[in-house]
């Protein structure tokens, strides 16, 4: 299950609005430091605008991915994402948590939250 969810998650970072819309539930909740709490339709509109402006993730790497089953059809995926926009030179890092629910045999996103990862290097 972890591999399947990681592949789905990587595809979501590809800024494909159709895949995003098909994967997120209509009433999904997304939480980002930059935007606060938003819904799927706002997120899809933002992706369309990023695409229009030629912005996309040029490099995305996941670290420390794990899952925690919550129920037979609900799972929490956690990972740290290291990602760089194509117009930036340095990557940023975020702690990510995505709640997946199984609907009609497919894993769909009910919630996704990103928290800026702070380096704790001495």
Image (spheres, rainbow, N blue to C red):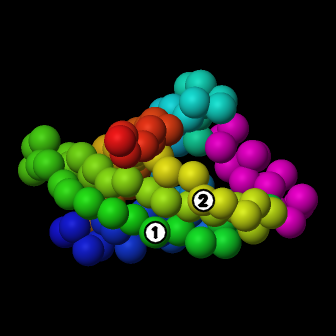
State the residue position of label 1: 61
Inspect the magenta stretch and tell me whether residue 75 lies in it.
Answer: no
User: In terms of depth relative to the viewer, which is nearer, 79 or 120?
Assistant: 120
* CA gap, disc 2 and disc 1: 10 Å
- Highlighted range, magenta: 41-54
Give the residue at x 80% y 55%: 50
Q: Residue at x 51, y 32 (%)?
A: 31
Mark 2 nearby-residue class (10 Å; few <14, some 14–19, many ≥20)? some
Q: Quadrant of the N terminus?
A: bottom left
- Asked if the residue at tag 1 contacts the one at tag 2, i.e. Cβ–Cβ closer than 8 Å, the answer is yes
Quarter of the image for residue 39 reads top right
Residue at the limit of the structure toward the right, as seen here: 53
Residue pointed to by mark 2: 91
Residue 86 as seen in the image, left or right of residue 24: right
55 horizontally vs 73: left or right: right
Would you place residue 65 above or below residue 95 in this image? below
Q: Earlier in the sequence, mark 2 or mark 1?
A: 1
């Amino acid at each position: 299950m972890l591999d399947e969810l990681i592949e789905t998650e990587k595809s979501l970072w590809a800024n494909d609005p159709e895949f995003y819309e098909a994967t997120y539930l209509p009433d999904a909740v997304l939480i980002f430091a930059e935007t606060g709490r938003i819904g799927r339709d706002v997120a899809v509109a933002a992706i369309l605008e990023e695409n229009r402006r030629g912005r996309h993730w040029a490099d995305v790497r996941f670290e420390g991915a794990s899952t925690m089953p919550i129920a037979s059809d609900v799972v929490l995926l956690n990972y740290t994402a290291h990602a760089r926009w194509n117009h930036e030179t340095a990557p940023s890092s975020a702690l990510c948590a995505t709640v997946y629910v199984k609907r009609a045999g497919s894993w769909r996103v009910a919630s996704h939250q990103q928290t800026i990862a702070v380096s704790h290097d001495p």
